[in-house]
Image: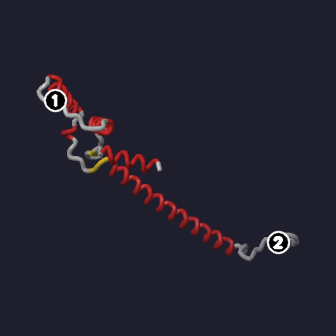
Amino acid sequence: TPRAEVTAKLRRLDIPVRDGEVSYQESLLALLRAASDAPVDLPAGLPITDKLESYIASSQKRARIDQMGTAQSTLAEEEAARSLQAAYRGRKARQMMAKNSRLAAADIEEWADAIGLSRYQPPRPGQARV
């Protein structure tokens, strides 16, 4: 199913959720990791490596990832929890609707008894109405 496919992809991405929020930087990093076949190690000691590491650090600082706290869960776990909650709420709503329809049917029967309609039988085909 489409939901199962999305959940499987989210599980592979392993995007952390911190205080109910998902960081754009961490999401982008997870997507980049998933897109590449193997991790790429930057060569040490090159000016471009230092520049990239500095850029990554400043991007994370601007994104305030260090202020977000530790990750309590991943995006896949959050989606699984939402799916379970939706299923539970849907079941409860269906149970409530069934209960309410039974109560409404009982109310109609009680009302029909009160005004003498409960003994009413509709005429059969070919039978004259009285």
- The residue under label 1 is which amino acid type? Pro
- The residue under label 2 is which amino acid type? Arg
Q: Secondary structure at mark 1?
A: loop
Figure quadrant of residue 47: top left
Disc 1, disc 2: CB below 8 Å? no
Q: Residues within 10 Å of mark 2 (few under 14, many from 20)?
A: few
The residue drawn where x is 28% and y is 45% is 17
Residue farthest bottom in this picture: 119
Task: Estimate the x, y position of residue 90 in percent, counting from the top left.
Answer: 47, 58
Task: Estimate the x, y position of residue 87 in percent, counting from the top left.
Answer: 44, 58
Q: Is residue 71 above or below residue 108?
A: above
Q: Is residue 102 above or below residue 66?
A: below
Figure quadrant of residue 115: bottom right
32 or 130, which is in the foreground?
A: 32
Q: Secondary structure at mark 2?
A: loop
Nearer mark to the viewer, of 1 and 2: 1
Label at residue 124: 2
Task: Estimate the x, y position of residue 102 in percent, counting from the top left.
Answer: 58, 69
Task: Estimate the x, y position of residue 80 in percent, counting from the top left.
Answer: 37, 53
The residue to which callout 1 is attached is 43
Q: Is residue 17 left or right of residue 101?
A: left
Measured in 3D between alpha carbons, the distance from the residue under mark 1 to the one under mark 2, in whole angstroms, is 92 Å
The residue drawn where x is 86% and y is 71% is 129
126 or 38, which is in the foreground?
A: 38
The residue drawn where x is 22% and y is 36% is 64
The colour scheme of the drawn protein is secondary structure
- Is tag 1's residue or tag 2's residue first in the polypeptide sequence? 1
